[in-house]
Each structure stands twice: as structure tokens, then as C-alpha cells.
């Protein structure tokens, strides 16, 4: 890939900087633009307890749109680390890094590696390194003539190098001690063969347990500092439901009547283009190869109009002129129309092979060959190919010698892509090529003229089944205004019922119980969304429109909002109305009783049940329990690293030093799911190892992989398991507050 060529085409390196900018920015004169502006306490957000410079953010947003926030956060977090560790990159080091000199390996960046890769073999050799340095140096010299452009590219690669150095420093600081290796070795190799029975706490009905509020309060006081009750973030849970968004029975009758009329009109239309565009909600301005439709799941489904997969045989068997439908459009159409429910009727205008495989030799006029010479050559090559039965070897030989196109053979072609080529295959496609491949059988070979030159084209394969070319009328199946008015009235009444009932309840528990009972009594389907105070967001797939999600957020964070706060009025969400309520809240750190009352009560009841089971197990063997209570004996072989579904808490007790014996019955033990009665049949203690060097090296590699695992860019909502332990820890330490949504909604500034 020629770097200069790409730089001149708006610069691929700059495009890469946009795509990988999360790695690319540090504080400095890049963000030198500053200005005033009225801001509140939060502004667009905080990082490390400091307000984010809104001018920096706006500058980045003007260049990188939605990527601006993660770019800026990553910059602020990582710059702090680089400065703290004194990590920088000199011009000499950067040059060595790019040129792979002074002990540096080839830069991992693919854009740079391409200079050092042999264009024929695709490998990096000593000679390709030498050649690569010459080519790269020449390209960089050209780039440096544009100081602004070079400054941006230099900053990008300097930051890439600093990120690498930072990860190297962290990796070198990871060390596994001998004691840790010994523990890991024992956990993997100390094995016990056991019999056990488990009685689940759920086997005792909750109604059998008496809960005294004073005892529950005491239980909370004793356990409120337990790790499982602590929260790293403050959040609110909003519970909401939608009024049934389906059209009414009357709407359905009217819709079917309308489509019957459209079907008749399309059947008798003199001009399919004019008729369908006059009736369809979605206009199709073409009725040629571009009107090819493909089934959902097809390799071109993201680019073309689709029909549901279950309609494939219907269209395959339909003759030209057949009217198909109405049929429900599939998920892809819903994606393209923001969740709207479309139906369609289609008229089959034609058919085209669903897959074409072909090859060509392209001959072009040049200084050595005029048009007459090209005509003579094309006829000669065609004659040679027509004379042989097995053309593969000869075709490749002739193409290699004569063709102006390095690409010889192309698969997965459609008539559509032949007419409207993808950018990387322009030398093969065109109307003339399309007609030849579409209208001639497999094995056909001939001369085809196009604006590119003279082609010798051979059709290699075609799918037996065809794709339809369709004239289609799309109509959204939605509730009528009459139906929507009824839904609005229903939602108003429901909101009023909830409002009045909630005002009569005092505790959060009573409010939640009332809300749930109303929702259940009216057969609504409730959903809940967790809104973190530092970055509240409603996932796109939760509702039909982003504005509906914004209304839920506004209700949850308006001044004075608490458990029981309802939306001010029903939220119009396309074809339905949404009602939501703040269902619960959670502060950061240790909880209040009301915040975890349900969880505390559940765990307290479970503990009381476990105590009852333990008491019932006293003095009884596994065999006694099997006979009395019909429990099933499990007989696994377990290690601390492989507990075979035994609770970790029980596993830890099982491998305590006092239990390193054989043929003993242990006292009943309580786990998360119930009470265990265990009999140890055999206990294997592994032989002592003189050296644990191999184990230590393996553990070191595992820790390093977890610590510096990619991806390493900022994402507020990424799960910890998907993120580098190190970067995840840095973001947690930074206490990042993304206030953009609440600022936009004028809720918190």
C-alpha cells in the first residue's frame, strides 16, 4: 500500500487515526483551544474528580462525532499514567520504532508492516526489511513536507509506542511468588473422591418461615458491610411497560381491504414504476437489475432489499408477472425502518441467477498494441481456448501473459453487482459483462466489449435457483388514529390509577408491590432498565425510539425523584404508550435497609431454611438421608480448581487441612444453594515438587494476558470480562462521570 497515495486520498493514516483514535491522544497543545461558557457543577462530565474541558470535547466531537468521548477519556486517563511513570518518546526512538532499527521489531501497526512485507510471498524477509526501510523513508520524507499532517501522524505513532511501553512496564512488574505457585499447584492436583447429597433451601416453602422484623433488622446490621451488598456505583432502576402496540381487529380488516385493492391495481398496472411509487411508503426509483431482492441471511442482504427467508421457495417458483403477498417484512426491514412493522406485495418482473462465477482476460489498447492488434489478439486467444476441453491451465497462462487485470476469477457475483460494481472489482464489471454472464449458460466463452477494453469472458458456474426482480409496495401495518386515541386514553387512566395508589403507600416495598400488582392485573409485560448515575442510558433495543428512553431518564433524574416517581405523562413511543416508575435506587458503597430490603429478606429466609436443614441432618449418614428424604447421591472426583458444581464456599471447607483424611463423614455444610452432607472416600495429596519454575512461568503469562488484554479503549458499559484488567482498573479509579445525556436533557448541568 503506497502511503503517499493514501495520504493524497484524504490520507488513510488520518482515517486510521479516526478509527483507532482511542489509542492516539495525549494532553498537550492539540487541545489548546479554550474558551468560556456557562457550566454547572458537572458540565459534560468528570474524570478523576475534575470537570472535563467542554472545549476539548467539542473540538473532538467536530472531528470524530460519537467517538469523541472515549477518545477524550482515554487521553485523560492514559496521559496521567504516562506522566506519572515518566513515559515519553523521543524523535530518535520514534524513528527507530517505525524503521525497525536499533533493536526494534517491525512495528505491529499494519499500515507500517505493509512496507516491510514482500508483495509476492506476503512474508517479511531480511531483504524485504531493507527494501521496506527505503520505501518508508521516502514516503515519510514526502509527508513531512506538510507539517500539520506530519504532526498528527507523528503524534499517533508516538502514542502507540507509549501505550506499548506502558504495557511493557506493567508486564515486567507482574511476579508470581513461590508460595503462590505452590498454592496453585496444590489446588490443581489435590484431589478428593467423595459422595454427597444436597438439599436445596427452595425445598422448604417461604410460607413455613416466620420473619420477625426486629430479627431482620438485626440481620441487616450484621451483614450490611458484606461484600455482596456493596455497590461500586450509584444507580436507579426504572420499571416500565408498554400498552399493547398491535393494531386493533378493525385496523386489521381495513389493512387487508387496502392490500386487496393494491394487489388488484398492481396486477393491472400499465406501468409498474409509476403505480408502485404512487402507493408505496418506501419508494423504489429503479426497475432493472437493481430491483433484485435477496432472502434475509444472503451474503448481500445488508446492501439490498430483502424478503423473509421463508418466502424463498415462493419467489423461486413464481413466474414473471405473479403477484406475491401481502407478506410480513423480516427483521432487516425493521432495522432499516427503526422498528416499524412493514408488509409488502411484490410483482415478479424477472429472474436472475443467485450466484455467478466467471473469469476474464482484459485486453487494452497501449503504445505497443493498437485497436486492430487487440481485435486480432482477442480472436486468437478465443480460438485457442475454444479448441481445448480443459481450459483452466491455458486460461491462467494466457491471462498471466496478456491480461491488464491482475484479478482473473470472481465468485459470488450477482447481476446487480455486475452492473453496479464494488470498488475493488471495477475492471471486471459492467453492463456488457452482466448481460453476457446472466444470459449465457455455464461453459459459454466469448468476446465482450466494455468501456475498459476487450474482455474474453467465460461463465464457470451458476446457481440453479434464481433471485427475483420485484416491483414492491411497502405499507406500514400500524394502529389507526382511532386506535391510538384509545391507547392514549387507556394509558392516561393507568397512569392516574398508579399515581393515586402510590400516593397512598408509605414504604418503598408497598409502592413496588402495588406497581407490580397493577401491571400483573392488566397483563402488561414489565421491563426494567438500570440507569447508572455516572452514565445513564437506555439501550436502543428496549424501546422503539430514543426519545422514549430520554423521557424515562428525565423522570428518574428530575429534582426530587425517588422510588415511586412516575413519568409525568404517558410517553408516545411510535405505535404505543409507555409508563415507567422509579422502582429502586442504590447509593454507592454500603446500602440503606430500604435499598436492599428485598435481597436481605431473601438471604435471611434462605439462612433460616439452611439452619432448619442442618438441624435435620444432625446425626444422620448419607444413606439415612437418601432413605428418609429421597435425596440423590453424587459421587464426583474434585479439586479446588474443578469442583464439579459444588459451591465454592463448601469446596474451600472440603479442602481445609483438617479434612485431609479418608473414609470420614463431614458435618453438614451450608452453601449458596442449600446444605451438603459429604463423605470423603479418598484424598490424594500430590507429591512435593522441588522446582515450580514451569508453573510460575505459566501463571506469569496468564496474569500478563489478563492484565493487558485487548480491547483497551474506554467504554462505560463494557463488562469487566471484556476489558483489560489494567485499563478497567484505571477507569474505575478515574471515577468517570459521563454527564452528556443529563446535560442534554437539562436535568443536571
Image (cartoon, rainbow, N blue to C red):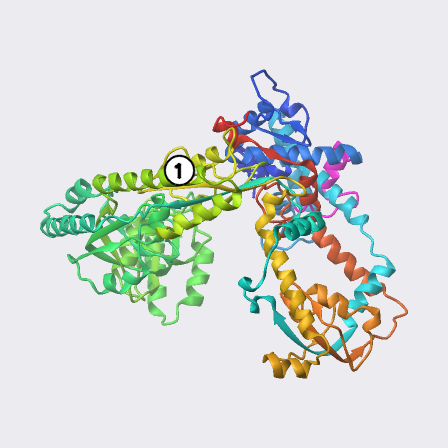
**Element carrying mark 1:** helix
| Location of residue 429 in the rendering, given as x and y in whole percent from the top left corner | 35, 50
Residues drawn in magenta:
87-108
Q: Is residue 81 left or right of residue 485?
A: right
Q: Is residue 422 left or right of residue 275?
A: right
Q: How many marks?
A: 1
Could you say which quadrant of the image residue 358 lies in? bottom left
| Location of residue 56 in the rendering, given as x and y in whole percent from the top left corner | 60, 25
The reply to whether the magenta stretch includes residue 105 is: yes
What's the residue at 68%, 80% (across, down)? 622
Residue 576 visible in the shown view: yes
| Location of residue 692 in the rendering, given as x and y in whole percent from the top left corner | 85, 65
Q: Is residue 673 left or right of residue 290?
A: right
Q: Is residue 705 above or below residue 49?
A: below
Q: Which residue is mark 1?
A: 500
The reply to whether the magenta stretch includes residue 54 is: no
What's the residue at 78%, 69% (across, down)? 655
Amino acid at each position: 500500500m503506497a502511503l503517499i497515495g493514501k495520504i493524497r486520498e484524504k490520507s488513510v493514516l488520518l482515517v486510521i487515526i479516526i478509527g483507532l483514535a482511542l489509542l492516539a491522544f495525549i494532553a498537550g497543545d492539540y487541545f489548546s483551544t479554550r474558551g468560556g461558557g456557562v457550566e454547572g457543577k458537572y458540565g459534560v462530565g468528570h474524570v478523576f474528580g475534575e470537570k472535563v474541558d467542554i472545549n476539548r470535547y467539542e473540538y473532538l466531537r467536530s472531528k470524530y462525532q460519537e467517538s469523541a468521548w472515549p477518545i477524550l477519556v482515554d487521553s485523560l486517563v492514559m496521559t496521567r499514567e504516562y506522566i506519572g511513570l515518566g513515559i515519553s518518546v523521543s524523535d530518535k526512538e520514534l524513528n527507530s520504532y517505525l524503521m525497525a532499527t536499533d533493536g526494534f521489531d517491525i512495528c505491529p501497526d499494519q499500515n507500517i508492516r505493509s512496507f516491510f512485507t514482500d508483495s509476492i510471498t506476503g512474508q517479511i524477509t531480511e531483504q524485504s526489511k531493507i527494501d521496506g526501510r527505503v520505501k518508508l523513508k521516502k514516503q515519510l520524507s514526502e509527508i513531512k513536507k506538510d507539517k500539520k499532517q506530519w504532526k498528527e501522524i507523528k503524534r499517533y505513532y508516538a502514542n502507540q509506542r507509549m501505550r506499548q511501553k506502558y504495557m511493557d512496564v506493567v508486564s515486567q512488574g507482574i511476579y508470581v511468588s513461590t508460595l503462590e505457585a505452590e498454592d496453585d499447584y496444590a489446588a490443581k492436583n489435590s484431589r478428593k473422591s467423595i459422595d454427597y447429597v444436597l438439599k436445596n433451601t427452595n425445598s422448604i416453602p417461604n410460607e413455613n418461615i416466620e420473619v420477625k422484623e426486629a430479627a431482620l433488622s438485626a440481620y441487616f446490621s450484621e451483614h450490611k458491610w458484606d461484600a455482596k451488598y456493596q455497590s461500586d456505583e450509584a444507580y436507579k432502576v426504572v420499571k416500565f411497560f408498554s400498552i399493547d402496540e398491535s393494531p386493533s381487529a378493525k385496523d386489521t380488516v381495513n389493512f387487508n381491504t387496502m392490500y386487496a385493492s393494491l394487489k388488484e391495481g398492481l396486477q393491472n398496472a400499465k406501468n409498474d414504476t409509476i403505480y408502485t411509487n404512487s402507493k408505496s411508503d418506501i419508494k423504489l426509483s429503479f426497475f432493472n437489475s437493481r430491483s433484485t431482492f435477496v432472502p434475509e441471511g444472503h451474503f448481500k442482504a445488508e446492501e439490498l432489499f430483502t424478503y423473509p427467508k421463508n418466502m424463498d421457495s415462493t419467489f423461486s417458483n413464481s413466474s414473471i408477472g405473479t403477484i406475491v403477498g401481502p407478506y410480513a417484512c423480516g427483521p432487516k426491514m425493521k432495522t432499516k425502518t427503526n422498528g416499524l412493522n412493514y408488509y409488502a406485495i411484490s410483482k415478479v418482473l424477472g429472474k436472475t441467477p443467485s450466484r455467478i462465477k466467471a473469469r476474464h482476460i482484459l485486453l487494452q489498447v497501449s503504445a505497443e498494441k493498437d485497436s486492430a492488434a487487440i481485435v486480432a489478439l482477442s480472436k486468437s486467444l478465443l480460438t485457442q481456448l475454444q479448441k481445448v476441453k480443459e481450459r483452466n491451465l491455458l486460461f491462467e497462462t494466457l491471462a498471466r501473459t496478456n491480461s491488464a487485470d491482475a484479478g482473473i476469477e470472481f465468485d459470488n457475483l450477482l447481476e446487480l453487482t455486475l452492473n453496479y460494481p464494488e470498488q475493488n472489482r471495477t475492471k471486471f464489471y459492467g453492463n456488457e459483462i452482466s448481460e453476457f454472464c446472466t444470459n449465457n449458460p455455464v461453459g459459454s466463452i466469448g468476446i465482450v466489449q466494455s468501456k475498459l477494453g476487450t474482455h474474453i469472458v467465460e461463465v464457470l458456474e451458476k446457481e440453479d435457483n434464481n433471485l427475483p426482480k420485484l416491483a414492491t409496495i411497502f405499507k406500514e401495518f400500524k394502529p389507526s388514529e382511532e386506535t391510538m386515541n384509545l391507547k392514549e386514553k387507556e394509558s392516561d387512566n393507568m397512569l392516574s390509577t398508579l399515581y393515586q395508589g402510590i400516593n397512598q403507600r408509605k414504604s418503598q416495598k408497598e409502592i413496588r408491590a402495588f406497581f407490580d400488582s397493577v401491571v400483573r392485573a392488566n397483563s402488561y409485560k414489565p421491563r426494567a432498565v438500570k440507569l447508572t448515575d455516572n452514565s445513564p442510558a437506555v439501550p436502543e433495543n428496549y424501546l422503539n425510539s430514543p426519545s422514549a428512553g430520554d423521557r424515562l431518564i428525565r423522570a428518574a433524574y428530575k429534582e426530587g425523584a425517588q422510588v415511586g416517581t412516575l413519568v409525568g405523562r404517558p410517553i408516545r413511543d411510535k405505535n404505543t404508550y409507555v409508563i415507567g416508575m422509579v422502582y429502586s435506587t442504590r447509593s454507592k458503597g454500603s446500602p440503606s435497609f430500604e435499598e436492599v430490603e428485598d435481597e436481605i429478606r431473601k438471604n435471611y429466609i434462605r439462612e433460616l431454611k439452611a439452619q432448619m436443614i442442618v438441624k435435620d441432618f444432625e446425626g444422620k449418614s448419607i444413606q439415612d438421608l437418601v432413605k428418609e428424604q429421597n435425596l440423590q447421591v453424587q459421587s464426583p472426583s474434585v479439586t479446588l480448581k474443578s469442583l464439579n458444581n459444588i459451591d465454592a464456599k463448601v469446596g474451600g471447607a472440603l479442602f481445609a487441612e483438617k479434612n485431609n483424611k479418608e473414609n470420614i463423614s463431614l458435618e453438614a455444610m451450608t452453601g449458596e444453594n442449600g446444605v451438603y452432607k459429604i463423605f470423603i472416600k479418598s484424598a490424594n495429596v500430590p507429591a512435593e515438587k522441588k522446582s515450580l519454575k514451569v508453573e510460575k512461568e505459566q501463571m506469569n503469562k496468564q496474569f500478563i494476558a489478563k492484565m493487558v488484554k485487548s480491547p483497551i479503549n474506554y467504554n462505560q458499559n463494557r463488562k469487566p470480562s471484556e476489558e483489560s484488567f489494567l485499563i478497567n482498573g484505571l477507569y474505575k479509579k478515574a471515577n468517570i462521570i459521563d454527564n452528556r445525556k443529563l446535560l442534554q436533557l437539562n436535568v443536571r448541568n
